[in-house]
Amino acid sequence: MSALAAAGWFAWAVLTPVQPAAQTLVMLRPGYSTRRIASELKSAGVIRSEDAFILWRYLSHRRSLKAGEYLFEKPASIIDIQKRLRRGDVYFHTVVVPEGFTMFDIARAIQAAGLGPADDFLKVAQNDTAMISDIAPGAPSLEGYLFPDTYEFTRMMTMQDMAAAMVRQFRQVARQIRLTQAPMGGANGAESSLTAISVTADNAGVDSSNAAPPPVDIEKIVTMASIVEKETAVPGERPLVASVYYNRLAKHIALDADPSIIYGELLAGTYSGALHHNDMRFDSRYNTYKYAGLPPGPIGNPGKSALEAAMHPAQTEYYYFVADAQGHHRFSRTIEEHNKNVAAYRHAMGGQ
């Protein structure tokens, strides 16, 4: 009878589903023994018996159980659970990276998703530039190359893994839009400022009579795209905004881009959440009011539309633009036109 009772108990413990008290996440780390795995599952209220879990694994020929974080929310038996662990059916955390997010924003999103401290991701984003050294050897960080998208990450992934996934997505989009191959069609002769001077390894040794156009300077294109991304959320305006900045570069006029000042203050840890008149004197190479030319690197992570606008700006004679209080912008050729547009904007905003 005792043998029958033991067999009955074992069948009950193995076959009867257990309903977790709530959605339950269990982290099973590499190197855990079967007994440690059983203990973690029992403590989480996912299985009834550690011994039954261990014995069933022995009877099922000890097939490998995969490490990872698992979500338990439905009734499941020990057999069901071991099947999941053998498949490696781990839980994925969703991280949404909208267009224009900075590495600081992404770090906070990763922390909010429960994947680790924001500071840990920032250390990678600020230091692991080897990930992009072949396409952006002078990049001060991974900013600009952490492509906006929706990502599914596990807690088994390192911060380097997550950053690398974003960089891979950038590379994929860059190939799609021929960022490394397309000739630069800048506005009013500004193209020379963004064309790479040196020959890339891919073109080295090629007969110049049949060579493709010089490759664009990816770092400068991405930097320009990041400014365009921050200045307008309207896709149709992006080539116009890009044309304004290329025209100003060609004439050696300061870009006067507010988002670049904000980014410089983010790097310095001094941004208060809003720009004030005194911020225009902030001493940083990212202050495009104080220093002419592009900032030292991207000020956010641009999407495909902004990258394409930076590669193919509209052909205009615009040098200024201002918001129109309706989510769009008004563009102008002269400072007089611009001042009228600014006055119209202030009037529309109630005289502010």
Image (tube, rainbow, N blue to C red):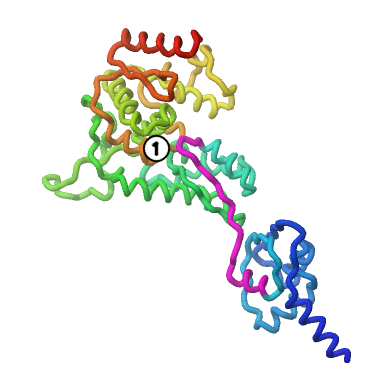
User: Which element is circle 1 on?
Assistant: loop
Q: Is 156 located above or below residue 256 in the figure?
A: below
Q: Is 32 located above or below residue 148 in the figure?
A: below
Percent x, y of residue 90: 60, 62
At horizontal 50% and vertical 42% (from top left) the residue drawn is: 97
Q: Residue furthest left?
A: 209
Direction from residue 83 to residue 138 in the image, left or right: left
320 or 288, which is in the foreground? 320
Q: Residue under circle 1?
A: 138
Direction from residue 104 to residue 75 in the image, left or right: right
Q: Residue furthest bottom?
A: 1
At horizontal 42% and vertical 13% (from top left) the residue drawn is: 345
At horizontal 59% and vertical 65% (from top left) the residue drawn is: 89
Quadrant in which the N terminus appears:
bottom right
- Tell me, yes or no, if residue 171 can be seen here: yes
Percent x, y of residue 178: 28, 45
335 or 331, which is in the foreground? 331
Q: Bounds of the magenta span? A: 80-102
Label 1 crowd (10 A; few <14 / some 14-19 / many >=20): few
Direction from residue 311 to residue 117 in the image, left or right: right
Percent x, y of residue 335: 32, 10
Percent x, y of residue 95: 55, 47
